[in-house]
C-alpha cells in the first residue's frame, strides 16, 4: 500500500493580495456606512447614491466567499450584511423621529447572531462563534456609538468611535482572510 501525502507551499503573494482585498472591502464597509450615517442624519441628497454603493460593497464582501464556499454561502452572507445595513438605517430613522430604538437594536442583535452562525457553520475551525461574535459585536457597538455621538453633536466622540471601528474592522478583515486561507490552503499554494 502506498500512502500519498500532499504538501503545499504557500503562495505568499497570493495570500497577501487576498488579505489586502479583504482589508480594502471591509474598510469600504465602515467608510460607506459612515457616509450613510452622516447623510441619513443630515438629510443629504447623496443618500441614495451612497446606499447603492454601500449595498454593492455587501455583495462584494459576500463574493469573497464564493470561490471557496460556493455561491449560496456568498449570497447568504451578502444578504445578512445588507440586513445589517438596513438595521443601522432603521435605528437612525427611529432615533431621528424620537421613537424607541429597542426594536431596531433587537433586530441588530438577531442579525449579529445570524452572521456569527453563518460564519461558524461555514468554517468552524477558523471562525469560532466566540471570536466572530466579539469582533462583530464591537463593530456594531462602535457604529452605534458613532450614530449617538453625531446625534449629540459630539464630534470628537464620533471620530473616536470611527477610529476604534476602523482598527476593529481591520482585525475582522484579517480574521476573515486568515480563515479563508487556512481552510483553503491548497488554493493559496504554488
Image (cartoon, rainbow, N blue to C red):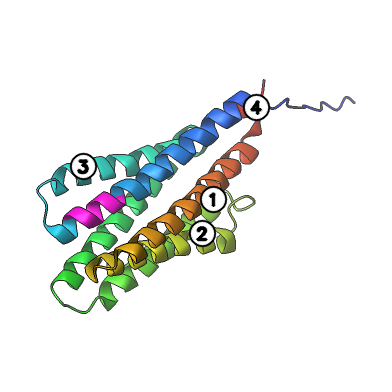
Q: Would you say residue 152 sits in the magenta stretch?
A: no
- According to the picture, the residue beneath numbered tag 1 turns out to be 171
- In the structure shown, which secondary structural element does the residue marked by tag 4 occupy? helix
- In the structure shown, which secondary structural element does the residue marked by tag 2 occupy? helix
The span from disc 3 to disc 1 (Cα, nearest Å) is 26 Å
Q: Is residue 183 visible?
A: yes
Image x and y of residue 10, in percent: 69, 27
> Residues in magenta?
33-39
Residue at the image position 25 percent from the left and 40 percent from the top: 53
Q: Which tag, 4 or 3, sits closer to the chain's start? A: 4
Residue 135 circle label: 2
Q: Which tag, 3 or 1, sits closer to the chain's start? A: 3
- According to the picture, the residue beneath numbered tag 4 turns out to be 12
Q: Quadrant of the N terminus?
A: top right
Q: Nearer the viewer, residue 79 or 57?
A: 57
- According to the picture, the residue beneath numbered tag 3 turns out to be 52
Q: Quadrant of residue 13?
A: top right
Image x and y of residue 23, in percent: 47, 40
Amino acid at each position: 500500500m502506498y500512502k500519498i501525502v500532499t504538501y503545499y507551499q504557500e503562495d505568499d503573494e497570493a495570500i497577501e493580495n487576498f488579505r489586502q482585498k479583504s482589508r480594502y472591502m471591509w474598510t469600504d464597509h465602515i467608510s460607506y456606512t459612515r457616509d450613510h450615517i452622516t447623510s441619513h442624519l443630515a438629510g443629504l441628497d447623496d443618500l441614495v447614491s451612497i446606499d447603492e454603493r454601500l449595498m454593492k460593497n455587501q455583495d462584494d464582501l459576500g463574493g469573497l466567499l464564493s470561490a471557496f464556499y460556493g455561491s449560496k454561502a456568498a449570497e447568504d452572507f451578502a444578504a445578512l450584511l445588507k440586513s445589517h445595513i438596513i438595521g443601522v438605517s432603521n435605528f437612525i430613522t427611529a432615533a431621528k423621529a424620537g421613537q424607541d430604538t429597542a426594536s431596531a437594536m433587537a433586530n441588530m442583535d438577531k442579525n449579529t447572531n445570524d452572521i456569527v452562525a453563518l460564519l461558524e457553520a461555514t468554517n468552524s475551525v477558523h471562525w469560532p462563534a466566540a471570536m466572530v461574535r466579539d469582533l462583530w459585536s464591537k463593530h456594531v457597538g462602535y457604529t452605534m456609538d458613532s450614530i449617538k455621538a453625531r446625534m449629540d453633536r459630539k464630534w470628537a466622540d464620533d471620530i473616536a468611535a470611527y477610529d476604534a471601528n476602523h482598527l476593529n474592522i481591520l482585525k475582522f478583515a484579517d480574521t476573515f482572510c486568515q480563515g479563508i486561507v487556512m481552510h483553503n490552503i491548497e488554493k493559496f499554494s504554488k
